[in-house]
Amino acid sequence: MAERTVKIASASGLHARPATIFSKAAAEQPAEVTIEKVGGSPVQASSMLMLMTLGAGNGDEVTLRAEGEGADESVAALAALLEKDLDADA
């Protein structure tokens, strides 16, 4: 199992545009990835609606987890996205 905890860099957290970018990237990964906020339940990283339920804001820590083939690469790619301000790319 691959696992990594990162801080969300996007100014608006995982809402609207950043959630859309992140969920699309997660859907393209070879491994199925979950994301959870500290103290919360894991949700599918590829589901924009589930991402919105996390209530993850700027500076919040979230944990990404994946199992199976490509798990390490999937977690690394998605962690890199979370560490960028996806709002700044607009």
Image (cartoon, helix red, strand yellow):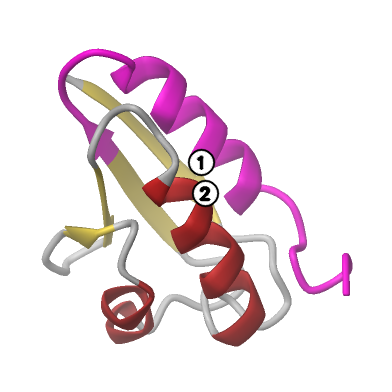
Between the residue at mark 2 and the residue at mark 1, the CA separation in whole angstroms equals 7 Å
Q: Based on the displayed image, in which of its 4 quarters is residue 69 positioned?
A: top left
Q: Residue 19: where, in percent of width, then height?
A: 52, 72
Q: Residue 4: where, in percent of width, then height?
A: 38, 32
- Quadrant where the image shows the N terminus: top left
Q: Based on the displayed image, in which of its 4 quarters is residue 47 positioned?
A: bottom left
Q: Any mark on residue 78, and which?
A: 1
Question: Is 84 left, or right, of 75 in this rendering?
Answer: right
SS at mark 2? helix
Mark 1 neighbour class, 10 Å CA radius: few under 14, some 14 to 19, many 20 or more: many
Question: Is 44 left, or right, of 61 in this rendering?
Answer: left
The residue under label 2 is: 25
Provide the residue span drawn in magenta: 65-90
Q: Amino acid at mark 2?
A: Ala
Q: Nearer the viewer, mark 2 or mark 1?
A: 2
Mark 2 neighbour class, 10 Å CA radius: few under 14, some 14 to 19, many 20 or more: some
Question: Is 25 left, or right, of 68 in this rendering?
Answer: right
Residue 83 in magenta stretch = yes
- Quadrant where the image shows the C terminus: bottom right
Q: Residue 7: where, in percent of width, then height?
A: 55, 53
Q: Any mark on residue 16, and which?
A: none
Q: Based on the displayed image, in which of its 4 quarters is residue 21 positioned?
A: bottom right
Q: Are marks 2 and 1 in contact (CB under 8 Å)?
A: yes
Q: Residue at x 53, y 59 (%)?
A: 22
Q: Residue at x 33, y 43 (%)?
A: 64
Q: Amino acid at mark 1?
A: Leu
Q: Residue at x 38, y 75 (%)?
A: 48
Up-down relation of residue 67 to residue 78 (above or below): above
What is the count of numbered marks? 2
